[in-house]
Amino acid sequence: MAHLARVALLALLLTLVAGPSYAAVTLPPSATDWDYQLGGARSVPAHVGIVERDRGATPVRGAYNICYVNGFQTQANQKPFWHRHWSLVLKRRGKPVVDSIWGEWLLDIRTKAKRTALATIVGRWTAHCARDGFDAVEYDNLDSFSRSHGLLTRGDAKAYAARLVRKAHSHELAVAQKNWAEWDGTTVGFDFAIGEQCAQYHECGSYVASYGRHVLAVEYGDRAFRRACRGWGDRIAVVRRDVDLTAHGVRRWCA
């Protein structure tokens, strides 16, 4: 009996160390094109089997659907919401730290308590993605620490990312690592990658090294798009979009 008890205890410890099994998580198909539709929904050609849309949009019937969630920064149109959660917005000299390109405030992930509070909010959005029928989630701006004027660290980002991954897996959603190519996000459980401008910045190989064929690339310039197709189009899905991802904007795939 004592031997059986030790075996049971060992099994429990191994489970706690390794984490739960997420057999229900489905990875994106690797033999299809994909579309990146954050600026507005549009029709989907027959050769496109993967579509990403904002968390407020409707998934595409018959496709693999990825739900966009801005997990590390605010959406520019959600400032009233974040004023109600003001302590969770990163500040410098009393003013919100801003991603100047998109006009988004950075979230304050510096402490365990704040990461827990933020993960609770983002977790509710994630649950909504699952209820709506999405298959996966992308938590954008993983690399917000690089725009934080030194207030956030890589360790903060990794700790918070791990929490978000667990939230997504608990709802049986696969999770995409978005950007920060030099970090292997599989170490905290990311399942696949979305490489924004990975050919432009010569980063596609880093994502492929971590995720194999489960990499989705989006390029915003013609030269980088051609480079992505030449170098990686036979292994990963590549789409050319306009930078604002408008509903009637540029959209092309590798020939």
Image (cartoon, helix red, strand yellow):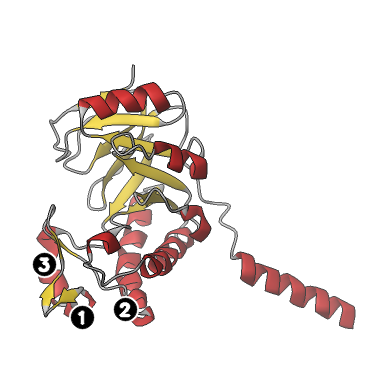
Q: Which residue is the site of mark 1?
A: 87
28 relative position to 221: left or right: right
What residue type is disc 1 on? Ser
In 3D space, how far apart are the residues under numbered discs 3 and 1 (Cα atoms)? 13 Å
Q: Residue 211: x percent and y percent?
A: 50, 43
Front of the two marks 3 and 1: 1
Which of 192/171 is in front? 192
11 relative position to 123: left or right: right
Secondary element at image label 2: helix
Q: Residue 144: x percent and y percent?
A: 27, 61
Secondary element at image label 3: helix
What residue type is disc 2 on? Lys
- Do labels 3 and 1 touch, CB within 8 Å? no
The first of marks 3 and 1 along the sequence is 3
Disc sitting over residue 79 in the figure? 3
What residue type is disc 3 on? Lys
Disc sitting over residue 114 in the figure? 2
In 3D space, how far apart are the residues under numbered discs 3 and 2 (Cα atoms)? 18 Å
Q: Residues within 10 Å of mark 3 (few under 14, many from 20)?
A: some
The residue lying at 43 percent from left, 53 percent from top is 183
- Do labels 2 and 1 touch, CB within 8 Å? yes
The residue lying at 40 percent from left, 37 percent from top is 204
The first of marks 3 and 2 along the sequence is 3
Q: Residues within 10 Å of mark 2 (few under 14, many from 20)?
A: some
The residue lying at 59 percent from left, 64 percent from top is 20
Residue 116: name its quadrant: bottom left
In 3D space, how far apart are the residues under numbered discs 2 and 1 (Cα atoms)? 8 Å
Q: Residue 172: x percent and y percent?
A: 47, 55
